[in-house]
Amino acid sequence: MLKWALIFLVISLIAGFLGFSGVSAATATIAKVLFAIALVIFLIFLVLALMAGSLAF
């Protein structure tokens, strides 16, 4: 998912450079949403791993 966020970020930067502001804004929003989802999933897995690690000892 983070890979897709980076792809949309690059598309947004290229579209912004070429003057397509509507496309740039839309892809930037998609990139932000995908990054936020990836961050939430990472934090959930981090908490689960820490809880599983503390239960093992």
Image (tube, rainbow, N blue to C red):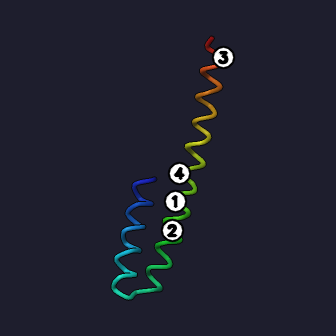
Q: Which residue is mark 1?
A: 34
The mark nearer the N terminus, 3 or 4, is 4
Residue 30 bears which disc, if any? Answer: 2
Residue 46 position in % (x across, y down):
58, 35
Q: Is residue 37 left or right of residue 5?
A: right
Are dots 1 and 4 in contact, CB under 8 Å? yes
Side (left or right) of 27 relative to 40: left
Sequence-wise, the earlier of marks 2 and 4 is 2
Residue 25, given in percent of the width and then of the height, sits at 50, 79
Secondary structure under the numbered disc 1 in the rendered image: helix
**Amino acid type, residue under disc 2 in the picture:** Ile
Q: Which amino acid, mark 4?
A: Ala
Q: Going from the N terminus, do you reach mark 2 or mark 3 first?
A: 2
The residue beneath circle 4 is 38
The CA distance from mark 3 to mark 1 is: 32 Å
Which residue corresponds to mark 3? 55
